[in-house]
Amino acid sequence: MSNDTSAMSNDTSAAEQLSENEENKLSPAQVKEYLRAHSEFFIDQDDLLADLKLTHESGKAISILERQITILRERGIDARQKLNNLIENARNNDQLFDTTRNLVLALLRADGITEIADVAQDHLSNHASIDACEIILVGNDRLTVAPSVRVEGSDKLHQDFEDVFRLKRTHCGTQTDEKLLYLFPENSDKIKSTALCPVVNNSEVLALLAFGNRTENFFNTNLDTLFLDFIGQVIGAVLDKEFTLLNTSSA
């Protein structure tokens, strides 16, 4: 009986010790946190370093130093990519600012609605990211412009581009083949994405600016349209001034 009791006692002691060891076992997260706080830990641990094993993607074991070099190289590549993206965005913003500045100056010198429409289309068409540009004025009974300027009735524009007129902000995305043909009659088959910008003044849409790009999804719902909306407002303010003069002279 005593032998049985002793065996049970040993089993219980072993179980308690195992349970205690499990409770005191460090988690991978704790080890990681400790090593991060003590980055010099391995300096005097040559014997431990010799026993550590890391597996490369090829299956070959490599040293910690080799792994560190690989990680740092990957991080360097990622950092360079992010830097290149920032530089590219800055370059695009600079180009857009130059286009906007030149456009504003040209609009201030423009004389009449026809010249305003021509100036806007010419300047915006020259931007590197714009493969096609059209401006369509919202027609009214007193509006008289040269045949080169596109004019469309308010009802049709509201019906075909309801979101743009309702929200009064730039809408980016894709359009149906029928709408592409209407917007860009000369090269609709080459346009893969569009940005439709309302020309607004005092909450009234005076015209529609249509931008096209040959790259699919170039103009997308995540695009920052601040500059495009600003351009629409500037053209709207200049057009409104001309409309006011036109109404005054007609009266």
Image: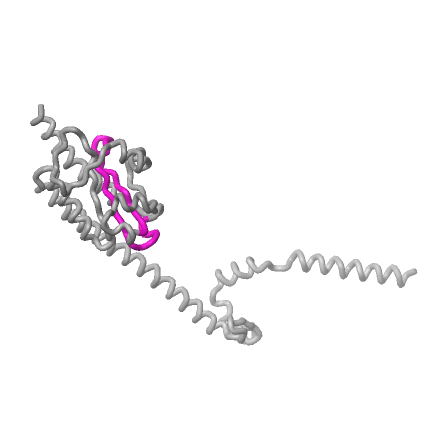
Decide if residue 241 is in sight here. no
Whether residue 50 is visible? yes
Choose between 121 and 66: the one closer to the eye.
121
Q: Position of residue 139 (x, y in %)?
A: 19, 33
Assess whether residue 195 is covered by the magenta stretch: yes
| Image-based side of 67 in relation to 3, left or right | left
* Figure quadrant of the C terminus: top left
Q: In the displayed structure, does residue 207 sit left or right of residue 6?
A: left
- In which image quadrant can residue 158 be found? top left
Task: Give the residue at x 59% y 58%.
Answer: 27
Q: Residue at x 92, y 60 (%)?
A: 1
Taking the spot 30% from the left edge, 43% from the top edge, the residue there is 179
Q: Is residue 236 above or below residue 105?
A: above
Q: Main secondary structure of the magenta part?
A: strand
Residue 73, image x, y percentages: 40, 69
Residue 183: give x, y in percent of width and height: 26, 44
State the extent of the magenta-drawn residues as a range: 192-219
Residue 242, compared with residue 13, is above or below; it is above
Q: Is 126 rendered above or below residue 2?
A: above
